Amino acid sequence: MRKTTTFAVAAGAALALALTGCGSKTENGTASPAGQAQDQSGSGLAAPFGDALKLADAAKQGTAKSKSAKISMDMSMGGKAVTAKGAMSFDGQDPKFTLTMDSPDGSTDMRYVDKTIYMKVPAEQAAQFGTDKPWLKISPDATDPLSQTFSQSMSQASKQSDPTQILDQVAKAGRIIGSDQTQLGGRQVNHYRVELDVNKAVDQFTGNLPAEVKSKVTQMLAGKDIKIPAELWLDKDQLPVQVTMDESALMQAMGAGAQGAGKVTVKYTDWGAPVDVAAPPADQVGDFSEIVKKLGH
């Protein structure tokens, strides 16, 4: 029995989040000067930026005012399509989110609050784990390696799912290779095609992985010329509307490169909407760390 299927999907989603938002086209991949008004329709959309640092700074100012959004995510993991929908608060002191993930292996509800992960697993899998509790808790202070890995991955994901963290990657390791103005979801947006150089920001891509794992990953990436193509769509308020990344080359370099793995699309809506995330009732929660001990992991 594959008792860790749900957790593999959840961890993959966490890592995807951690490593993740027809106009007048620019010529030769160079955008018009920042602030130059191009729009004649009254949408208020300014010209695209030509410099990755200026792009990141402007977008961070936009997201800093809102700090929350609804999200939907599509990704490929191990050759399987995984989707997720939910809402996130990007408060640096108290990040939280709620997600519902769907994959060929079933549906999983996730909550992240008070730095603790809660997952509602299918009843069949809960029975395989030897518990009748619908929710499983992974505490940040758990001592078993599996819980620590999930907890640290999710903690990093909660930070990196904040678009400002993705924008930090763009500022540190990215270059704009092309831009244009187009429509997405019925609104006028600036569309950027960006290339991220992993070697320029290895620490950001390895995040808060356990020290031993991070060291091994860093060694695996050493000396490899890995580029990650990404695309960003920003509205007139410099808020991300959609972000796509193709981390296939990175996943393959780390030995996890199943066909299609590493491709992620995240869409953001309802910026500034309140996000209410609460822990499930205590009598419905089992401790994943205790389950791991029973399973002998």
Image: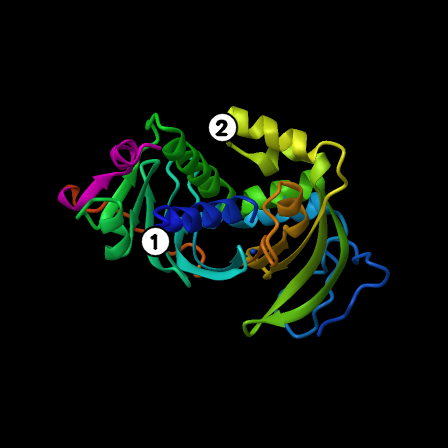
Q: In which quarter of the image is residue 222?
A: top right
The local secondary structure at tag 2 comes to: loop
Magenta-drawn segment? 283-297
Residue 267 seen anywhere in this rendered image of the structure: no
What's the mark number on residue 274?
1
Query: Residue at (73%, 43%) from the top-left corner?
Result: 226
Query: Residue at (61%, 45%) from the top-left corner?
Result: 167
| Residue carrying label 2 | 210
Say which quadrant the C terminus sits in.
Answer: top left
Seen from the viewer's position, the closer of residues 155 and 65 is 155
Packing grade of label 2 (10 A; few <14, some 14-19, many >=20) is some
Q: Of callouts 2 and 1, which one flags the residue occurring earlier in the amino acid sequence?
A: 2
Report whether 90 appears left or right of 201: left
Q: Which of marks 2 and 1 is in front?
A: 2
Packing grade of label 1 (10 A; few <14, some 14-19, many >=20) is some
Location of residue 207 with respect to 260 vertically, above or below: above
> Is residue 284 on the magenta stretch?
yes
